[in-house]
């Protein structure tokens, strides 16, 4: 009986510590991924991948209808507008938090995967696909 006690206590302690360890994904990696299936950057499509990320995280201020009121006039709904900010570096600067305007404003940071998708869309030539 006595022999059994030590491993047993050890097991309980392990379970306690393992059970108490909790960090939300958001705290560790930024916001949840918008493209939840896989972090697929093999194609990076504007309509299917980039736009949904902007829609979920940016359109509360940068949709065409809200831009004037809450987005400082910056529209991120149409391809041509997004391309403008991709080309002048402001889009990546804002989501990487390397510019003076970290985005999403007052909303933490995009997930690593979402950032990777936008980055790879730009690297592949900001295609209207
Ligand atoms: C709560 C409203 C809000 C949200 C959400 C938001 N923005 Fe902004 N954004 C602003 C405002 C306001 C500005 C003008 C600069 C400032 O006041 O911070 C701005 C500026 C910008 C700029 C211009 C930065 C520069 O260097 O001039 C870019 C690019 C941008 N936002 C992209 C985004 C992206 C991408 C997202 C989503 C990931 C996003 N924003 C989410 C409000 C928002």
Image (cartoon, rainbow, N blue to C red):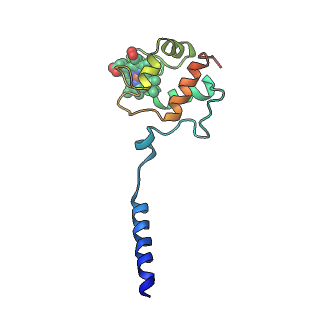
Q: Residue 106 vs residue 89: left or right?
A: left
State the residue at coordinates (60%, 15%). 125
Q: Residue at x 41, y 72 (%)?
A: 10
x%, y% of residue 93?
42, 20
Whether residue 28 is visible here, answered yes or no, is yes
**15 vs 109, nearest the viewer:** 15
Q: In the figure, is residue 112 to the left or right of 37?
A: left
Q: Ligand 1 quadrant?
A: top left
Residue lying at the far bottom in this picture: please name it.
Answer: 1
Vertical placement of residue 59 versus 27, above or below: above
Name the residue at 40% across, 75% down: 9
User: Does the rendering let one see residue 71?
Assistant: no
Q: Tell me if residue 86 comes above or below residue 30 in the rendering.
A: above
Name the quadrant of the C terminus.
top right
Quadrant (top left/top right/bottom left/bottom right) for the N terminus: bottom left
Q: Nearer the viewer, residue 16 or 46?
A: 16
Q: Is residue 7 left or right of residue 127?
A: left
Q: Looking at the image, which residue is at 43% across and 26% down?
A: 96
């Amino acid at each position: 009986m006595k022999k059994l006690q030590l491993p047993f206590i050890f097991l309980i302690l392990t379970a306690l510590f393992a059970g108490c360890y909790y960090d939300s994904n958001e705290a560790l990696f930024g916001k949840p991924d918008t493209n939840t299936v896989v972090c697929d950057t093999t194609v990076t499509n504007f309509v299917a991948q980039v736009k949904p990320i902007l829609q979920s995280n940016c359109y509360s201020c940068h949709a065409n209808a809200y831009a004037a009121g809450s987005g400082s006039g910056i529209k991120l709904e149409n391809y041509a507008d997004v391309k403008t900010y991709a080309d002048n570096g402001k889009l990546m600067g804002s989501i990487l938090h390397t510019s003076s305007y970290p985005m999403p404003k007052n909303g933490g940071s995009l997930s690593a995967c979402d950032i990777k998708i936008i980055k790879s869309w730009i690297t592949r030539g900001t295609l209207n696909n």
